[in-house]
Image (cartoon, rainbow, N blue to C red):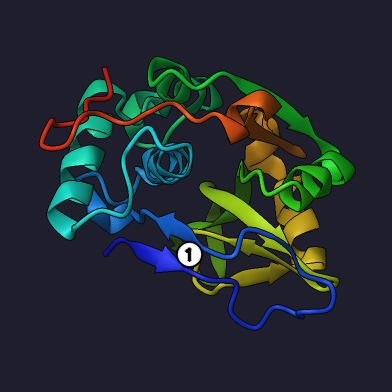
């Protein structure tokens, strides 16, 4: 279920980033095992005001449905989720110029400037046998950090430790998709001049 989330547990003395962000999750769409890229893109585009304001659950499902229909997961026919190319295409199609965020220093700078960043982390996928799990990737939006943690959308908790994030951001699956230690952000000038949303009562399309 989509909702506005906050950096719960952040250290107020060292926190840098957004006070809150409206979050889409896999469950807002149909392809729930594979649509984290679409969820991250919809979260990002909502922040950029491509979509006006917070959404009702019905509106969120409509937006995710359009993203999945027009830009479905594409890695290995969609069974391995969504490529960097497709996530970037969703943003550009919606009118958002984007730029690469390269490395932790650049990531921290964007977040300090209140510019959320789409990132991919390596996570455990399907269980193969015994204690072994297939490697998988998970798209999220980073929106803040403090001295110990980075705060992320569509994750099992409000944040990861920096140590955990560094490990999974540079891991095997992000490397395979050319997105390791790289993020996706809106170009700077767009943050203060976001793309206007549709007129009230008009549906928003991701074409």
* Image location of residue 5, percent across then percent down: 46, 68
Q: Residue at x 46, y 25 (%)?
A: 91
* Image location of residue 154, percent across then percent down: 46, 59
Picture quadrant where residue 71 is located: top left
Taking the image as shown, residue 132 lies to the left or right of residue 36, namely right
Q: Residue at x 70, y 78 (%)?
A: 10
Comparing 20 with 173, the one in front is 20
| Number of residue marks | 1
Taking the image as shown, residue 167 lies to the left or right of residue 9, namely right
Name the quarter where the C terminus is drawn: top left
* Image location of residue 131, percent across then percent down: 56, 71
Label 1: which secondary element: strand
Q: Residue at x 75, y 32 (%)?
A: 101
Compared with residue 53, is residue 64 higher up or lower down, i.e. above or below? above
Comparing 48 with 200, the one in front is 200
Compared with residue 122, is residue 62 higher up or lower down, i.e. above or below? above
- Whether residue 88 is visible: yes
The residue carrying mark 1 is: 129
Name the quarter where the N terminus is drawn: bottom left
Comparing 151 with 198, the one in front is 198
* Image location of residue 201, percent across then percent down: 10, 37
Compared with residue 53, is residue 178 higher up or lower down, i.e. above or below? above
Circle 1: is it few (<14), some (14-19), or many (20+) Cα within 10 Å?
A: few
Residue that lies at the very extreme toward the right in this rendered image? 105
- Whether residue 187 is visible: no
Taking the image as shown, residue 196 lies to the left or right of residue 139, namely left
């Amino acid at each position: 279920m989509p909702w506005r989330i906050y950096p719960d547990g952040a250290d107020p003395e060292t926190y840098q980033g957004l006070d809150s962000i409206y979050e889409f999750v896999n469950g807002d769409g149909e392809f729930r095992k594979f649509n984290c890229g679409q969820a991250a893109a919809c979260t990002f585009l909502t922040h950029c005001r491509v979509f006006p304001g917070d959404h009702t659950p019905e509106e969120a499902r409509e937006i995710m449905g359009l993203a999945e229909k027009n830009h479905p997961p594409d890695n290995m026919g969609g069974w391995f989720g969504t490529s960097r190319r497709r996530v970037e295409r969703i943003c550009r199609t919606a009118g958002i110029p984007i730029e690469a965020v390269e490395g932790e220093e650049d990531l921290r700078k964007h977040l300090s400037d209140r510019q959320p960043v789409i990132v991919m982390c390596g996570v455990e996928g399907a269980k193969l046998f015994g204690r072994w799990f297939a490697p998988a990737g998970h798209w999220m939006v980073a929106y803040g950090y403090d001295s110990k943690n980075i705060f992320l959308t569509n994750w099992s908790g409000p944040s990861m430790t920096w140590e955990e994030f560094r490990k999974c951001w540079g891991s095997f699956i992000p490397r395979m998709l050319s997105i390791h230690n790289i993020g996706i952000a809106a170009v700077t000038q767009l943050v203060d001049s976001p793309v206007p949303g549709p007129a009230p009562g008009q549906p928003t399309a991701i074409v």
